[in-house]
Image (spheres, helix red, strand yellow):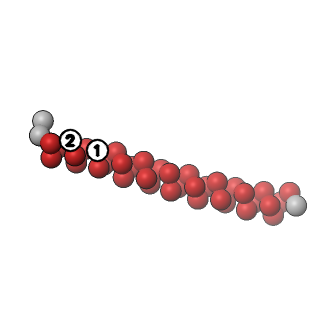
Amino acid sequence: MTMDEDTKRHAQIYDGFVQFFKYGTIAVVISLVLMAIFLV
């Protein structure tokens, strides 16, 4: 196992985490907007 392979694997995990976090944030914002529309 070379450092290059390990770095590449770490970068893939990091990209996946960032993408998941981004979509999670978007989902939370949409949920809050819908709650504001329907509950107020």
What separation in Å lies between label 1 and label 2 (alpha carbons)? 6 Å
Q: Which residue is mark 2?
A: 6
Type of amino acid at the residue the image marks with label 1 = His
Are the residues flagged by discs 1 and 2 in contact, CB closer than 8 Å?
A: yes
Type of amino acid at the residue the image marks with label 2 = Asp
- In the drawing, does residue 33 fall left or right of residue 17? right
Mark 2 crowd level (few <14, some 14–19, many ≥20, 10 Å Cα): few
- In the drawing, does residue 27 fall left or right of residue 1? right
Residue lying farthest right? 40
* Element on which disc 2 rests: helix
Q: Position of residue 26 (x, y in %)?
A: 58, 59
Of residue 19 and residue 6, the one placed in the foreground of this image is 6
Residue lying farthest left? 2
* Element on which disc 1 rests: helix
Q: Quadrant of the C terminus?
A: bottom right
Q: Position of residue 38 (x, y in %)?
A: 83, 60
Q: Residue at x 30, y 48 (%)?
A: 12
Q: Residue at x 78, y 57 (%)?
A: 35
Q: Position of residue 24 (x, y in %)?
A: 56, 52
Q: Give the quarter of the image for residue 19.
A: bottom left
Q: Give the quarter of the image for residue 9.
A: top left
Residue lying farthest front? 3
Marker disc for residue 10:
1
